Every structure is written in structure tokens, then in C-alpha cells.
Amino acid sequence: MAENSWPFNEGDGASVDQVRWQKMAAAFSPSGVIGKATDNALSVAQNLSSQLPRTVDVQPGKAFVKGFCYESDAAVTLQFFENPDMNPRIDLVVLELDMSKGIVRLATVKGSPASTPLPPSLTQELGGVWQIAIAECTIASSATSVSTIYDQRVFIGNSLPQVHSDLGRTMMGTPGDIVYARDSVGGEAVWGYAGNGGWSPISNLGPTRKYRPELHGLATQDGIQATGHFQWVGSNMCWVTANLQNVSGRDLRNGTTPLSVSLPYSPRGGITQLMNVMLYRDNGSADSLILHNGNAWTGGWNLAWMSFPNTDWGTYWLQTFPKDANLWLTGLIEMDLFHEGNS
């Protein structure tokens, strides 16, 4: 068994090549853009002035890639390959460390067209090529410009690495990694990486997140006022509340179709989960009062079906949303961020 140590002024430790340097320096910090999530460093945007099609500009900035530094002092323009396929394609803008060439450079990685495209995998080989994602760029069929840009920068140099977009797409993690994530609409959360599952939010930071719940089973959402809140309270666990009001002036139904309320994420399947739900109406007259407590059932879809005992608005499953009534739904749900499906 050999023992080695470095760097030193004398002895074996005095010989430090780039391989030895990487083994040591990669432990100093995770890879990422040096700065904060509010910085413009290495941000990617459309290049509208270029004569070339499908180009983006990457702003100046500094980064650390698996033990090696990168710095640019001017914007760098990159061009993507054309997409002759009928389906869209997601390409990556990356910082690429190439140990054989001794350089770190901005580059593009071409994805595969699909009806629902996914970003290509990153190459991450210790001692070889190591890529980190800067942005995802969607290239539509025969497009001459980039359709959408999804920020994938990871910021370092703070108490926790910071991410400017939702995780779970191209960022590779190591079990035990914890990052601060801020998405494009300002939502903040602490995420953790599990060896058995990948990335999931551990807890939201700041105010609760908002979403607009929909009442599924109806032909239209006209006449429904709705608001919803959710908050991650643990790994894969999310608290959800939704309020819906029928302001259409009439009962809403679609034959005998059961009505369900949409959730912000899909719950895990293979197990039934319950939420509390209340159907309430009181517009001042004695015969208008409705007050029913029931359950909302979910599992495997981003919907919760509602049932009430002994109601006039459906046998078992709620089929009618009465005029002027309110639906209030709340509960703690195990979501399916780990894509466990019905297992």
C-alpha cells in the first residue's frame, strides 16, 4: 500500500502536476460561478445583434471548475447547431475543463430532439473532461433563434452554494450536498441531495409559495375564484392549502363527473393520501347554509378528489360545486420528486 502527500518544498510532495492539484483543490470548494444568485456573472442571454442564427452571449465572470479557475473579462458569443428535426431540442451552455488541453472554456452540448426533450448528460470525469451547466437552451424545429433559456448557474463563495433555478435537471450532486436555491419567480428553498433519490427541497425559506388551483372535471374554469399556497416542510413533504369560490351565479357540474382540485406537484402514487376539505356556503338565508366536512383523496396524480358523507351534490364523490359556495382544502402530502411512481 502506497502513501502519498503533497504539496511540499522537498521530497515526493514537491512534484505537483495538474492531476495531483485537482485531487487537492477540488476539495476546496464545489464547482460553480463565483458570486451570488443576484449577480450577472456568466449569465446567458439571446444575442439579438449577431448576424449568425441561434446565438447567445455569456456575460463576463469567474468560476471554479473541479479545482481550476476560469475568468472572462468580456462577453463570449456561442452558436448552437441547427435543428432540422420536427421536435424541439434542449442544448446546454457549459463550462468545460479539459485536462488534456489544460484549459477551461465555455462550450455548448447538443441534446436530442423529442416531443418532450430532456437536457443532455454532463461529462464529468476526474482527470479528464469535467463540465458544469450554465444554462439550458431550447432550440425549436428549424429555429433561427433560441426559444427559451433556463438558468442553471450554481453560485459559490458563500456559506452555502447558491443555485439560481430549480434543481433536479442537470446539476449533479453528491449525497449530503446542501444548497440554497432561488428560482425564476423569487422562491427560495434549501435543497438536499440524497444518494437514494437525488435532489429535493428540505424547506422553503421566506413566505409561502403561491399557485392557482383548478377545479378539474368542469368544461371551463370561468366563474371560479381560486388561490393556493404551498410550503416544503421536509424532504419530499409539502403542505398545501387551496381555496376556491363559485362566483358564477349558478351550480357548476359536468354530468356525473367527480370534481377534483389540482395540486402544485404530483403526489407519490401507490399509496392513498388524505387531505381535509370543507364545502361551505352562507349567503344570509336560512336555506342557503351548507357546511360539510369531508376528505380529499390523492395518489399518483396532481389532483385531489373530494368526498362528503350524505350530501345532495353527488353520491360519495363531489359532483357539483354549488352556487356561491366555497371549497377549502388543506393537508400535508408526500410528493413524487424522486419519481418513485407506484412503488
Image (cartoon, grey):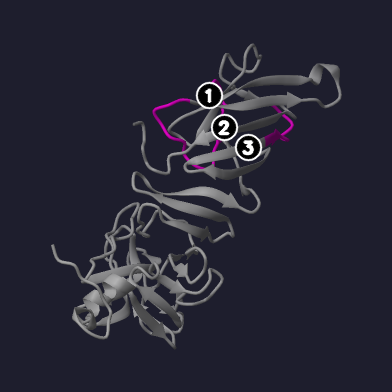
Residue 264, horizontal then vertical, whole percent: 54, 43
Quadrant of the rendered structure where residue 128 is? bottom left
Identify the main secondary structure in magenta.
Answer: loop
Q: Secondary structure at mark 3?
A: strand
* 224 horizontally vs 298: left or right: right
Q: Is residue 322 visible?
A: no
Check contact, mark 2 vs mark 1: CB within 8 A: yes
Highlighted magenta segment, given as a residue range: 244-272
Q: Secondary structure at mark 1?
A: loop
Residue 273, horizontal then vertical, whole percent: 50, 27
Q: Residue furthest left?
A: 1
Amino acid carrying label 3: it is Thr
Quadrant of the rendered structure where residue 17 is? bottom left
First in sequence: mark 3 vs mark 2: 2
Q: Which residue is labeled 1 in the image? A: 257
- Between the residue at mark 3 and the residue at mark 2, the CA separation in whole angstroms equals 21 Å
**234 and 248: which is toward the camera:** 234
Q: Is residue 70 visible?
A: yes
Q: Which residue is labeled 2 in the image? A: 218
Question: Residue visible at 72% across and 28% down?
Answer: 325
**152 and 255: which is toward the camera:** 152
Residue 210, horizontal then vertical, whole percent: 62, 48
Question: Residue visible at 56% across and 34% down?
Answer: 332
* 22 horizontally vs 156: left or right: left
